[in-house]
Each structure stands twice: as structure tokens, then as C-alpha cells.
Image: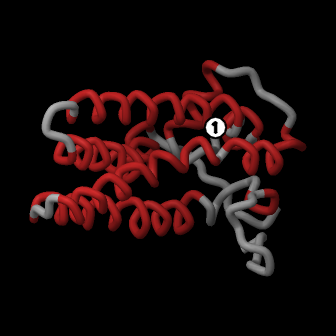
């Protein structure tokens, strides 16, 4: 293991690490609020409830297979929460569990831009355009850069992670 493992991670550091994810969820809810005239609150609340469910799923079926969560090395708050509520599962199956279960979070990324694009085509507003741009910047630029730049760079399970592309230096 060539990585420098994180030490002395504070709760503030962990919350800051996951802040882009939470901002993405809020921006997604704003898009859904802007999208529908009658049912917008319902859609926004259902989206946020699904995001909470997806995070619980992530913690239960991905974090519970990761050594970082149970050795207090996880830079995010979700691994820390998982270690308190879910029993540690086999670390050898991290890669398979990650691949199989990460798809649950995809809807958190896909539903808001699809709803926004539909609204922009059928009922264009500047507010929706701004919300879509903000969501896209956070979800598809800031979140991945922040994650791979900090979390992934110092991760103890980096060599097992499916997020690291083949041919990329997994021990950097």
C-alpha cells in the first residue's frame, strides 16, 4: 500500500468532503420544484427521499465492504456513519459489491437533468437553465474532481476500486 492514509480526520473535514453530493441533491430538488406546476413539491420530496434511500443503500452495500469505514480512514461522513450502523462485510468482495450497487445512485444524477431538459424544450425559462447549469457543474465537474482529487488519491482500497480506470496508476 503506497498511499498516504488520512489521519486526524475531523467531522468538519468529512462533511466538507461530502458537501458537493449534498449540494447536488438540493439542486436536483430545485430543478424538480421548477419543473412541475402542480406536483413540484411532491416530485422534489420524492427525489430527496430517493437520494436518502440511495445513500443508505450505498452505506449498507458499498461502505460496509470497505476497510476505510471501519478503520476511521474514510474521508467522507458516509463511511463513518456506515461503520456505526452496518456490520462490516467481506473486504474481498468490495469491487464486486461496488460495481453491483453503485447503479442505485445513478438516478440521483440522471433524473434532474432529464427533467430540466424536458422543461427547457417544452417551457423554457432562464431559472431552469441556470438550475441545470449549476446542477451539471456540481454533479459532473466539481463532485468527480473533488472526489478523485482527495478521497481517491489517499484511499486504502484504491487498487480495488472500479472507479479507477484500467491502465491508470492504481497505486499513485
| Residue at mark 1 | 72
Query: Residue 12: which quarter of the image?
Result: top left
Q: Position of residue 5 (x, y in %)?
A: 67, 55
Looking at the image, residue 117 lies above or below residue 75: below
Q: Residue furthest left?
A: 126
Instruction: Report the coloring of the rendering.
Output: secondary structure
Q: Closer to the camera, 71 or 102?
A: 102
Q: Position of residue 47 (x, y in %)?
A: 37, 35
Q: Is residue 134 left or right of residue 49?
A: left
Q: Position of residue 35 (x, y in %)?
A: 21, 47
Q: Closer to the camera, 59 or 128?
A: 128
Tell me which residue sits at (74%, 60%) in the image.
162
Q: Is residue 73 left or right of residue 146?
A: right
Q: Quadrant of the N terminus?
A: bottom right
Looking at the image, residue 171 lies above or below residue 104: below
Tell me which residue sits at (66%, 29%) in the image.
60
Tell me which residue sits at (35%, 51%) in the image.
112
Q: Secondary structure at mark 1?
A: loop
Q: Position of residue 83 (x, y in %)?
A: 65, 27
Amino acid at each position: 500500500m503506497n498511499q498516504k492514509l488520512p489521519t486526524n480526520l475531523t467531522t468538519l473535514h468529512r462533511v466538507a468532503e461530502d458537501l458537493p453530493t449534498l449540494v447536488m441533491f438540493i439542486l436536483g430538488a430545485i430543478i424538480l420544484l421548477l419543473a412541475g406546476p402542480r406536483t413540484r413539491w411532491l416530485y422534489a420530496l420524492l427525489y430527496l427521499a430517493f437520494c436518502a434511500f440511495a445513500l443508505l443503500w450505498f452505506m449498507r452495500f458499498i461502505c460496509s465492504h470497505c476497510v476505510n469505514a471501519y478503520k476511521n480512514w474514510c474521508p467522507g461522513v458516509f463511511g463513518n456513519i456506515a461503520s456505526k450502523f452496518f456490520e462490516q462485510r467481506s473486504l474481498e468482495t468490495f469491487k464486486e459489491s461496488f460495481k453491483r450497487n453503485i447503479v442505485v445512485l445513478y438516478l440521483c444524477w440522471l433524473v434532474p437533468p432529464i427533467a430540466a431538459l424536458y422543461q427547457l424544450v417544452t417551457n423554457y425559462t432562464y431559472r431552469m437553465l441556470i438550475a441545470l447549469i449549476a446542477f451539471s457543474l456540481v454533479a459532473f465537474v466539481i463532485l468527480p474532481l473533488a472526489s478523485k482529487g482527495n478521497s481517491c488519491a489517499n484511499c486504502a482500497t484504491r487498487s480495488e476500486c472500479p472507479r479507477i480506470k484500467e491502465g491508470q496508476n492504481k497505486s499513485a
